[in-house]
């Protein structure tokens, strides 16, 4: 009888400790794959977000260029992303990244291509940043920028670097 009670107690403890894990929602990091993210429309053609997600650590490159057809320099920040209380935050500007359910977005099919991930970083008027199937990198990224992203992903703790981007020629 004593062994039955002990077995019952152990089984109860195991079931109650494991069951919350079985019903837990995936971590936000798992919903934000690596790649180059763009926003619909032409206003932000010179802007993008690049995510590097490796072993649960995320780094983001924020490239804010001038509006389409305007002259100006890209502003680039490479930053680590922290999970605080189940929410993702860009360490460089303390903005929350809101991972979106792509099936709920009207842009789910973006120019005939499938959107595989999306987020809003609350850093501008662009709205959702979309990862389109096949967009693993952006051809405008330089080796120096790629090196900084690798530094970010390999650094323990926070990482924030601002670097000068390209000067873009425009009509205005």
Image (tube, rainbow, N blue to C red):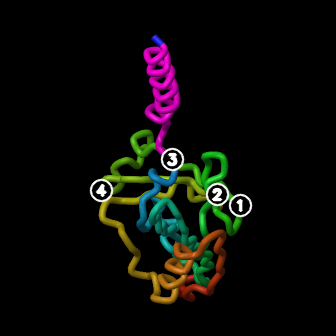
Question: Residue tagged by mark 1?
Answer: 94
The mark closer to the camera, 1 or 3, is 3
Circle 2/circle 4 CB separation < 8 Å: no
Disc 1 crowd rating (10 Å Cα; few below 14, some 14-19, many 20+) is: few
Quadrant occupied by the N terminus: top left
In primary-sequence order, the first of circles 1 and 3 is 3
Specify start and end residues of the magenta stretch as a single range.
2-27
Displayed quadrant of residue 121:
bottom right
Disc 4 crowd rating (10 Å Cα; few below 14, some 14-19, many 20+) is: few
Question: Residue tagged by mark 2?
Answer: 89
The mark closer to the camera, 4 or 1, is 1
Question: Residue tagged by mark 3?
Answer: 27
Q: Of helix, strand and loop, which one carries label 1? A: loop
Q: Main secondary structure of the magenta part?
A: helix
Q: CA distance from mark 2 to mark 4?
A: 28 Å
Q: Is residue 149 above or below residue 42?
A: below
Picture residue at 40% right of the left edge, 75% below the top = 138
Q: CA distance from mark 1 to mark 3?
A: 19 Å
The answer to if 133 sits in the magenta stretch is no
Q: Is residue 55 above or below residue 23?
A: below
Q: CA distance from mark 2 to mark 3?
A: 13 Å
Left or right: 5 with respect to 164? left
Q: Position of residue 81 (x, y in %)?
A: 60, 63
Question: Residue tagged by mark 4?
Answer: 113
Picture residue at 30% right of the left edge, 65% below the top = 134
């Amino acid at each position: 009888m004593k062994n039955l009670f002990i077995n019952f107690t152990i089984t109860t403890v195991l079931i109650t400790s494991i069951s919350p894990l079985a019903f837990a929602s995936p971590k936000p990091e798992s919903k934000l794959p690596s790649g180059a993210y763009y926003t619909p429309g032409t206003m932000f053609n010179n802007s993008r977000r690049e995510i590097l997600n490796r072993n649960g650590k995320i780094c983001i490159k924020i490239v804010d260029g001038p509006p389409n057809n305007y002259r100006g320099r890209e502003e680039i920040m490479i930053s680590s992303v922290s999970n605080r209380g189940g929410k993702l935050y860009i360490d460089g500007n303390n903005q929350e990244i809101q991972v979106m359910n792509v099936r709920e977005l009207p842009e789910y099919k973006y120019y005939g291509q499938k959107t595989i991930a999306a987020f809003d970083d609350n850093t501008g008027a662009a709205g959702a940043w979309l990862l389109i199937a096949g967009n693993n990198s952006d051809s405008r990224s330089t080796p120096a920028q790629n090196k900084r992203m690798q530094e970010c992903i390999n650094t323990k703790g926070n990482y924030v670097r601002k670097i000068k981007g390209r000067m873009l020629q425009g009509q205005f």
